[in-house]
Amino acid sequence: MRESWRWFGPNDPVSLAEIRQTGATDIVSALHDIPIGEIWPREAIKAHKALVEEQNDTMSPLHWTVVESIPVHEDIKLAGAGHEKYVENWIATLQNMAAEGIKTICYNFMPVIDWTRTDLKYQLPNGAYALRFDQDRFAAFDLFILQRNNATDDYTEDELARAEHVHEAMTPEERTGLTRTIIAGLPGKMTDAYTLDDFREALARYENIDHSGLRKNLIAFLAQVLPHAEKAGVKLAIHPDDPPWDMFGLPRVICKPDDLDKLFDKLPSPANGITLCVGTYGSRPDNDLPQMARDYAERIHFAHLRGVTRDPQEQRSFYEASHLDSDIDMVRVIRHLLENERTLNREIFIRPDHGHLMMGDISRTSNPGYSAIGRMKGLAEIRGVITALSAP
């Protein structure tokens, strides 16, 4: 497997010099400063790649080999008037990436919001901190802070009562913090930051889009992109919706195997693949991750290896656990990925994901989920499993 590490560019608190010390060899990155929908110029890609590789002659080499993510403009998801230019720009960016030798592209098709959490510093019993999604806190925000139209239709009477109790117990500062956490733009998030009014307006644009409509728009987008990906030797790896269920009345269409089957039945191109984000898919108890690692062997071009522990009383609530100590059998997942590599004679890019905030990093600036020590711990654990399973 190809051990990779997500790097947010020169402003990332985790430097390339530190990444080298983890033993990772591949960099997962993007041009975050370019507005969504615009073409990534080849010269800008070349310059970013040169930053990654500038010390390769004297230090352990690093290579930018995976892009995460080229954002998909909202007008494409809505199939809005004039969205064709954004599809053309996405294709041009893909071609420019391929021309610089970067041929694995992770992307997502989540409307309005990217990955969503309610707590960025949930303290674990050992003193470290994890990311957490609490369904009751989310409902409290949706119902009583955002006050989304018709939001009550999405909750049971018991859920409404629990959310109201949570909201009433929160201080004004806690409500502000929850709002910022959900909509203000997480590091790594590929959409814009919103005010509450902006957010309501963005949600309103999707009032007439249901699951079939959004899936139709995804398929239409890929039908235009995939021929160019095939020609350029690029593998597309769609990331699941995180968390993998509908939110804010928005449809989400990459949540479970049935969603993937519909996508591949319509578009069987070998360039049409997935990012197996184990933690995201594993947030649903009905997703069998070891089985998915087997069933989609030829489609897995990239894997995020992290685990989650779900709340036994509310299965939509979870915290991001240690990479090997969660509700997911990570050892079996890795075993199947290794079998995929041997059978198909290829290597899969993997990376540790959303490591715990721990030890010296607690007092150091870091992007939520992307501190150094926690991810290095996760990578070391994954490397240990790979080494053990690969032993003769």
Image: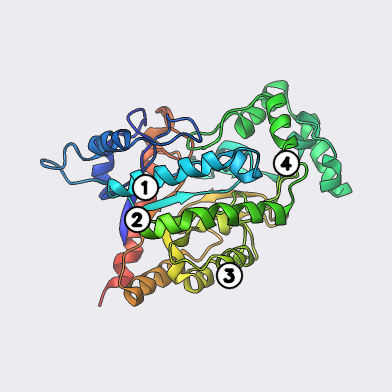
Q: Are marks 1 and 4 in contact (CB under 8 Å)?
A: no
Q: Which residue is mark 1?
A: 95
Q: Identity of the amino acid at label 1?
A: Gln
Tell me the CA gap for discs 1 and 4.
30 Å
Circle 3 crowding by C-alpha within 10 Å: few under 14, some 14–19, many from 20: few
Circle 2 crowding by C-alpha within 10 Å: few under 14, some 14–19, many from 20: some
Q: Is residue 49 above or below residue 273?
A: above
Q: Are marks 3 and 1 in contact (CB under 8 Å)?
A: no
Q: Disc 4 on helix, strand or loop? A: loop
Q: Is residue 267 above or below residue 369?
A: below
| Residue 279 image position (x, y, % from top left) | 53, 55
Residue 165, by quadrant, is top right
Q: Are marks 2 and 1 in contact (CB under 8 Å)?
A: yes
Left or right position of 340 against 150: left
Residue found at x 77% / y 45%? 208
Which of the two discs, 3 and 1, labels the residue nearer the N terminus? 1
